[in-house]
Amino acid sequence: MRFDHRAVPIALIAMLIDSVGFGIVLPVLPSLIVELGNVGLAEASRIGGYMLAVYAVTHFFAGPVIGSLSDRYGRRRVLLISLTCFGIDYALMAVAPTLAWLFLGRAIAGVAGATYGPANAVIADVTPPERRGQAFGLLGAAFGGGFIIGPAIGGLLVDFGARAPFVAAAALAFVNALVILAFMPETLAPANRRAFEWRRANAIGAFAPLLRAGGAKALLAGAVVWQIAHMVYPSTWSFFAEIALGWDARAIGWSLAASGVSMMLAQIFLTGRAIRRFGEERTVLIGLAAGAIVFAGYAVAREGWQIYALIAAGALTGLVFPSINAILSARVDASNQGALQGGMASLASVAAIVGPLAMTQALAFGAERSFGGGAFSLAAALCVVTFSIFLFGVVLRRGQLA
């Protein structure tokens, strides 16, 4: 794919580096919570869920503000500030003496906001609507690429202690900010900027232009339920791998790296082709069907080869969000792309509040009864719900399968 603007590959690199930093800490997070909280793995999984929920609550309120600020001041400045704050967050977590410090770090990260929303807005600024699905897929591929490198590095750094990956993640976040500062041009034209309004700096206000376009309620409902299901990975994978499979941090790191390889290859080679062949709506259905099957498979799998086979098949779930985002992005104008992505970040925050709490509780409930697949059973059920919402509320309603 050729890039329509030189900011696009820089945004992809920024997402790659950011996800490397996020992935580095995943293999060691369970052991750090166990160490600081003096608890067992089942209880640590619950604490991990609460920690993700703190991030999500703060980000729910901050996400639309950040999106609206990027519509006013541009994408570059917002990305730069966000990445700098993430560096501070990881540095804080690297020296955290108690669990309370870890929770404070997650709150800071939630207020700062993630890079994914502004990076999506960069794509929307410079990419024609008919090619945005593929471009959003490449952004997902960059995120997946970070999960190849990050967890593998995290698994190796564990030899230097549970804090070392957080130091590395802080350094990567600061390097990422420098890359944005030095090389990324602004993509939001002055003519497309709009005044910042507090009444639009919230999830409802952010979606106002989209809702006026009509037919968006089922799309948004499906998106949030899907994201709740997908939270099973970041909220439970490290704990699931230890409880159900008996894996150590190194094995967890390699499995996450394999997941990143699978995701990246699917986003690069499948997303664009699937959308061109089937259209965005049907591509979403394919990804959701694959998700239901794969999540159910994880719930009962107990051998390493089974897990890696499911990781490969699970790449198809990467078709879902780029396709939904492309459908939504095509329904709003250039001056509201940042607000839309901020609103989507708020939806992701709702999912990140509900998802980790539900998934970690399901995991712990099952683990206490010698069943490690509780979280993935719940995720599979939610995939079926999302498939139904999208099929009956979007696709059949518009006659896409007729």
Image (spheres, helix red, strand yellow):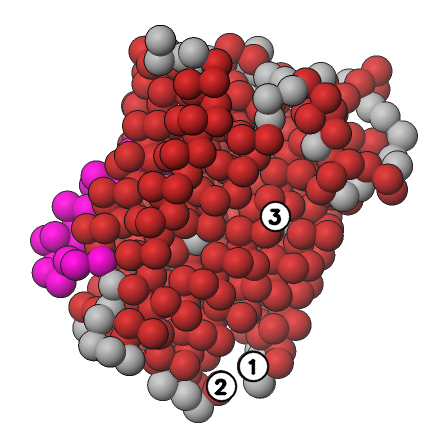
List the residue tagged with mark 3.
114
- Residue density around tag 3, few if under 14, some if 14–19, many if 20 or more, within 10 Å: many
Contact, CB < 8 Å: mark 2 with mark 3?
no
Amino acid type of the residue tagged 1 in the rendering:
Leu
Question: Per the image, is 305 magenta?
Answer: yes
Residue stretch rendered in magenta on the structure: 299-318
User: What's the mark number on residue 99?
Assistant: 1
Q: At numbered mark 2, what does the secondary structure look like: helix, strand or loop?
A: helix
Q: At numbered mark 3, what does the secondary structure look like: helix, strand or loop?
A: loop
Mark with earlier residue (2, 3): 2
Amino acid type of the residue tagged 3 in the rendering:
Ala
List the residue tagged with mark 2.
36
Mark with earlier residue (1, 3): 1
Amino acid type of the residue tagged 2 in the rendering:
Leu
- Residue density around tag 1, few if under 14, some if 14–19, many if 20 or more, within 10 Å: some
Residue 263 in view here = no
Residue at 21%, 39% (x, y): give it.
313
Quadrant in which residue 42 is drawn: bottom left
User: In the rendered view, would you say 173 is above or below 244?
Assistant: above
Contact, CB < 8 Å: mark 2 with mark 1?
yes
Residue at 51%, 10% (x, y): give it.
130
